[in-house]
Amino acid sequence: MWNPFKKKTDGAADEAAAPKAGAPAKKESIEERIEREIDALPGMIKNKLKDPQIKQRFIDIAKRMEKDGVDFKSIRQMKKWMKAHEAELKAEQAGGVQKVETVVHEGPRIGRNDPCPCGSGKKYKKCCGKDK
C-alpha cells in the first residue's frame, strides 16, 4: 500500500547500504561502535569522551554490558543494567580517586573569651574571631 508520509529513497542507495546476500555481515567491534556514536554527539560531550581514560572506562562498561547480554538499542535494558551494577561501578571509580585527608589543627585551642593571639589585647571574639 502506498504511504504518503514515507520518505522516498533512491533504489541505488538501498542496494549500497544493504550487505550482499552471499557475503557474511562483518560485526562491528564495541570500540568501532562507540567511536561512531561519539562522533554523532554534540561537541561539548564529544570533547570529554576524547579523554583516553574516560573513553576506556566507557568501553569497559560497554564490554561488560555486552557480556551480560544487554541490547544496546534498548535504553531501558541499559538503565536497568546500570542500576543493578551501580554499587560496583562506583566502587571501581572510587578506587582511582585519592581520598582527601582531614586537616588536624595541632596548636593550642583558642577560646572565645581568651586574649587574641594577634596581640591586640582584645578578646578573640571581638578581634580575629569576630567573623567566625
Image (cartoon, rainbow, N blue to C red):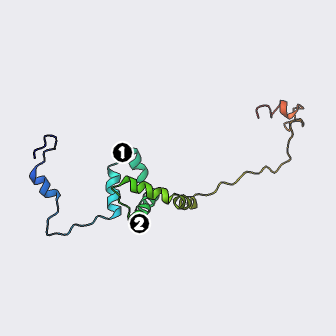
Label 1: element kind: loop
Judge from the rendering whether residue 106 lies leftward or rightward of residue 91; answer left or right: right
Q: Which residue is drawn at 49% across and 60% down?
A: 85
Q: Neighbour class for label 2 at 10 Å: few (<14), some, many (≥20)?
A: few
Judge from the rendering whether residue 6 lies leftward or rightward of residue 115; answer left or right: left
Q: Neighbour class for label 1 at 10 Å: few (<14), some, many (≥20)?
A: few
Label 2: element kind: loop
Q: Residue furthest front?
A: 1
**Residue underneath mark 2:** 68
**Residue underneath mark 1:** 42
| Quarter occupied by the C terminus | top right
Q: What residue type is labelled 2?
A: Asp
Residue mark closest to the camera, 2 vs 1: 2
Residue 41: where, in percent of width, then height? 35, 48
Q: Which residue is drawn at 14% across and 65% down?
A: 20
The answer, for residue 99, to whether it is visible in the render is yes
- Gap in Å between the C-alphas at discs 2 and 1? 29 Å
Q: What residue type is labelled 1?
A: Pro
Q: Quadrant of residue 78?
A: bottom left
Residue 40: where, in percent of width, then height? 32, 49
* Dot 2 or dot 1, earlier in sequence: 1
Of residues 8 and 30, which is closer to you in this image? 8
Q: In which quarter of the image is residue 43?
A: top left
